[in-house]
Image (spheres, rainbow, N blue to C red):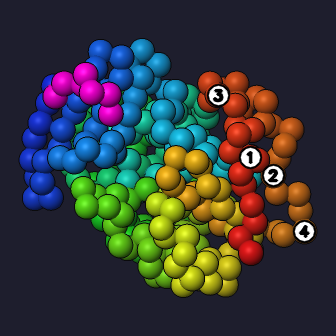
Amino acid sequence: MHSSAQEIYRCYDELGPIQVMDDGHKRYLAFGTDDEQSCQLIHQPHLLQHEYTRAILLSLLMVTPKHITVIGTGGGTLLTCLHHILPECQLQGVELRSKVARIAYNYFQLPKNDLIKLHIGDGFVYLNEVETTTDLIIADMYLAEGIDQQQLSTKFIAASFKRLNQGGWLVLNYWLDHKLETHLAQALQQTFDQVYMCDTGGGNWVIFAGKVDINKEIIQLENIKSLSKAAGFSLNHFLKRLVVLA
């Protein structure tokens, strides 16, 4: 977060403070800490700013989704980007905190569109209770103190697998520390057909787990130029960092 950023809004809920900061160029969401939960260019709201969110877009080389579920929406920047790239795709956001969802609309330009829906509630409960299936699940469940521990559980991985259509992918944003937790790697490898991981270079470790036919070509390299153009940045940097989970 830039040192010149000034607080323009603050509210509280049962989990603590929620802040919106602004430096005139970028807008930031924070949960009462120095860590940015979301960052957005004010005049280009669809252009992703965090390295890990940019890496997440590699999933669009693995599947052409008609329905995407984003769990942990924060300021809604990823939803805004996905809607820009895939304007016909149905987007389902799941956000634990209702005031965070309201801020996404009021301060982060999350589009009000029939193809973008927000559910307020716990992400793990949502996966277990909803009947709708999806082509892509992106899990980015973080609180002020760090990652929501449910995202580190084998039950979360199993629930995500059940909710995915055949050919679908689960994308998990972890801090680099979590790559050492062997139970996560084992659960992903035992549950999914293909698992990739990407060290984003910014302190995050993005995992891609596919419910796919491993005999087919998975990475659609012919789409990288058009996807990079739509996203506003080159995906080659992250594609080079993508490796199969050994």
First to last magenta residue range: 1-7
Q: Nearer the viewer, mark 2 or mark 4?
A: 2
Q: Nearer the viewer, mark 4 or mark 1?
A: 1
The image quarter containing residue 226 is top right
Residue 152, image x, y percentages:
44, 74
Query: What residue lies at 58% left-to-right and 48% top-to-bottom?
Result: 201
Question: In which quadrant is the C terminus drawn?
Answer: bottom right
Query: What residue lies at 67% left-to-right and 84% top-to-bottom?
Result: 190
**Which mark sits nearer the N-terminus, 3 or 4?**
4
Q: Amino acid at mark 1?
A: Leu
Separation of disc 3 and disc 1 at Cα?
13 Å
**Which mark sits nearer the N-terminus, 2 or 1?**
2
Whether residue 70 appears in magenta in the rendering, the answer is: no
Q: Is residue 56 visible?
A: no
Separation of disc 3 and disc 4 at Cα?
30 Å
The residue wearing badge 3 is: 233
Which numbered tag is attached to residue 239? Answer: 1
Query: What residue lies at 79% left-to-right and 30% top-to-bottom?
Result: 225
Q: Residues within 10 Å of mark 3 (few under 14, many from 20)?
A: some
Q: Quick check: marks 2 and 1 in contact, CB under 8 Å?
A: yes
Residue 98, image x, y percentages:
21, 49
The secondary structure that dominates the magenta segment is loop
The residue wearing badge 4 is: 215
**Which mark sits nearer the N-terminus, 3 or 1?**
3
Left or right: 90 as drawn, with respect to 124: right
Residue 34, image x, y percentages:
26, 44
Separation of disc 2 and disc 1 at Cα?
10 Å
